[in-house]
Image (cartoon, rainbow, N blue to C red):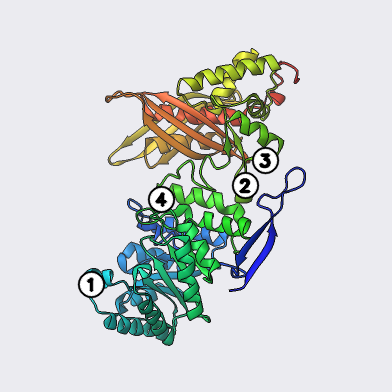
Amino acid sequence: METKSFIFNVVPPNKGEPKWGIVLLNAFPKKVRIFDTTLRDGEQTPGVSLTPDSKLRIAKSLDKLGVDVIEAGFPAVSEGETEAVKLIAKEGLRAEVCSFVRGTKSDIDAALKCDTQSVHLVIPTSDLHLQYKLKKTREEVLKLVEESVQYAKDHGLVVELSAEDATRSEFNFVKEFFAKGISVGANRICPCDTVGVLTPEKSYKFFSDMSKTFKDTIISAHCHDDFGMGVANSIAALRAGAHQVHATINGLGERAGNAALEEVVMALHLIHGVKTGINTKLIYGTSQLVSRLTGIMIQPNKAIVGENAFTHESGIHTHAILSHPSTYEPISPEIVGVTRRLVAGKHAGSHGIRASLETIGLHPTDEQLKEISMRVKTVGDKGKKVTDADLMAVAEAVMGLPQTRPINLEELTVVTGDKVTSTASVRLKLNNKVVSEAATGLGPVDAAIKAVRKAILVVEPIHLEQYHVKAITGGTDAMVEVIVRLRKGDRTATAMGVREDIVMASVEAVISGMNVLMANYNKRGDKQAEKP
């Protein structure tokens, strides 16, 4: 295969001249197709079960993101799944809408009832699966491929034929399997690394051989992450001749998950200079939506979309970041639709703390900054998280400023029960004016937070991005710690609430965070030290 080289810059220049380098690689496709399987393989994550409306919301978000194919679900599995796939298929999305099917006419008929454009037809090829799951011989499997593909094509469907557990199958049989499918009209083929046993080297060899054998057919890579190499194996497969990659948002999927879409796309765009149709600025928002609707929290150190991916605490790092972001950021956060965060803690330096305070109009003197930094480190040394609300309170105390807050809770009433929809009514003092609102929710906490958000919506559109809760003492009267992260425009703020009552702890945290986002000492006119 021909080797190509090009010049690239991982981080678009922010200050000064960028550093350029040379990457050598084999011929990737000019544009890689993205087959998103969040709504099928991703939903097979243990504990995840999406309603039809939730699946439609995610599908619409994926369509805006720019994926080429949306695997909407597995219609044969339930009535709810059929309803979801139908909803997505009739939405008129730009992306191709695909149904998962096995090698049975009943599965294909279920997909036809949903009016999807294509089917992802999956049949096992490994002797292990044939003997213990399918209980068929290789000859019977080839007959099944012929009949299933022919039936789908006779009914006007685009067919993507997948060999399940292909990477643990006898290679010549995999080739025979795909040759049979192509002979009766299969449009695309996909050898699946079902249990993630490939390495990048093996993936390159495997897909190189496949692409030489099936030169005129679109080949997909479907890699699982059981050994943590799903993304690397996908990139190697594309470099070796695959044209399309199967992936999920946040790497959702069975066991250790699938190759993460956001990681594959950013590696292609910024490391290899290969195009996809993905609007990368929508990656973070799509990731957050999927996380909320699936209930699967994103690990903080998750690449691209994790809470810490563009968050800096260490004084050494923040000083450099403020001078030139690319010193510790291989990706500019704006590219994926997120903003950089500098947080306070025991590792924090004065430059980072000063920058954080200046966003709300606080300009401490050098002596005041030294005292603020010392107090922050003292809290951090006790093993406690320093939120943005904590930092503001410390700075106000050191600078002798009054702790006046735009939002104050006057009254909160929550009604809940087995046969009663949780309802909350709240009365707040907002900029010295009393406002009242009510809302319903999935539980008392959800209802209370929604009521608070509705009450302040007339002034500020503030969104809850993350919510974490833990008991910090034992027993039924345990103290509960709630930590939230809120967003207003391109600013975020963290805050904490600690109470015996989880509802009050949650409301306390949310209001504290909102107060940070609404704080602006430049507008308040409070007397403070001159900016040094």
Query: Which quadrant is home to the C terminus?
Result: top right
Q: Which tag, 4 or 3, sits closer to the chain's start?
A: 4
> Distance between the Cα atoms at labels 4 and 3?
33 Å
Amino acid type of the residue that numbered disc 1 sits on in the rendered structure = Gln
In what element is the residue under mark 3? helix
Proximity of marks 1 and 4: CB atoms separated by less than 8 Å: no
Circle 2 Cα neighbour tier, 10 Å, few/some/many (<14 / 14–19 / ≥20):
some
Give, as a three-letter code, the residue at label 3. Pro
Q: Which residue is mark 2?
A: 330
Q: Which residue is mark 3?
A: 325
The residue tagged 4 is 294
Question: Does 280 sit above or below residue 521?
Answer: below
Q: Position of residue 445 (x, y in %)?
A: 40, 35
Residue at (46%, 31%) from the top-left corner?
A: 483
Which residue is label 1 attached to?
A: 131
Q: Amino acid at mark 2?
A: Pro
Q: CA distance from mark 3 to mark 1?
A: 55 Å
Does 32 appear above or below 360?
below
Q: Residue at x 28, y 80 (%)?
A: 138
Q: CA distance from mark 2 to mark 4?
A: 29 Å
